[in-house]
Each structure stands twice: as structure tokens, then as C-alpha cells.
Amino acid sequence: MVEISYVEDWRDIPPERWAKMMMTPEQYTAMRAERLAREHAAPGIGDPAPDFEIERLSAQGKRTGEMFRLSSRRGRPVGLVFGSYT
């Protein structure tokens, strides 16, 4: 059975637990600040999607050299498939 313990405040984490996590309190604080900033900058539900340009792949997953810009499809449905092809 795996024991799961919940820590109310990260400052209550003992040093041996930080060592197991291979992270220092300072690294945790920096990581958390970065994640909060990224979440704050992310579009919310109902917000317009940010425009981007990306290379299209062939049906076989090969690079085509053909570029796609999201704004070129404004007002029309777009399906995006995100994944790793490696």
C-alpha cells in the first residue's frame, strides 16, 4: 500500500522529502512562480485563440514545407491534433 501524505504548506516539507523530490525550496518557489505567470497569460475559456503559424504534416506524418496560419481560417471550424510523432 502506498502512503500518500498531504502537506498544507510547502514550508512544512521536511528536508529529506525535498531531497527525494530532487528540488530545493528555492527551485520550487521559482517553478511555481513561472507556472502561475504562464497560467495568468493563457487565454481563458471563450477567449479568442492566439494566432500561430505551423508547418502541415502529410498523412504519413512527414514534413511538407506547407505552412498553416490559424487566422487564415477565421470564422470557420478548425480541428487541431496535437501529439508527438517521435
Image (tube, grey):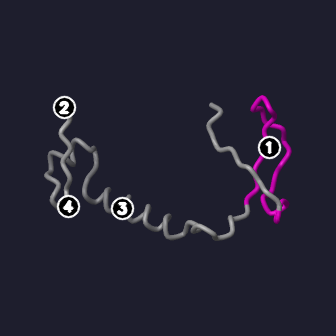
Q: Secondary structure at mark 4?
A: loop
Query: Quadrant of the rendered structure where residue 3 is?
Result: top left
Mark whose residue sits in front, 3 or 2? 2
Mark whose residue sits in front, 4 or 1? 4
Q: Position of residue 64 (x, y in %)?
A: 84, 38
Q: Distance between the Cα atoms at labels 4 and 1?
A: 46 Å
Residue sitting at x 47%, y 68%: 37
> First in sequence: mark 4 or mark 1?
4
Asked if the residue under mark 1 is in contact with the one under mark 2, i.e. CB atoms within 8 Å, the reply is no
Q: Secondary structure at mark 2?
A: loop
Q: Position of residue 73 (x, y in %)?
A: 83, 60
Quarter of the image with the C terminus in it: top right
Amino acid under disc 1: Arg
The residue segment tinted magenta is 52-75
Q: Position of residue 7 (x, y in %)?
A: 19, 56
Image disc number at residue 1: 2
> First in sequence: mark 4 or mark 3?
4
Q: Distance between the Cα atoms at labels 4 and 3?
A: 19 Å
Image disc number at residue 8: 4
Residue sitting at x 73%, y 59%: 52
Q: Position of residue 53 (x, y in %)?
A: 76, 55
Image disc number at residue 56: 1
> First in sequence: mark 3 or mark 2?
2
Q: Residues within 10 Å of mark 4 (few under 14, many from 20)?
A: few
Q: Residues within 10 Å of mark 2 (few under 14, many from 20)?
A: few
Q: Distance between the Cα atoms at labels 2 and 1?
A: 47 Å
Amino acid under disc 4: Glu
Asked if the residue under mark 4 is in contact with the one under mark 2, i.e. CB atoms within 8 Å, the reply is no
Q: Is residue 77 left or right of residue 39?
A: right
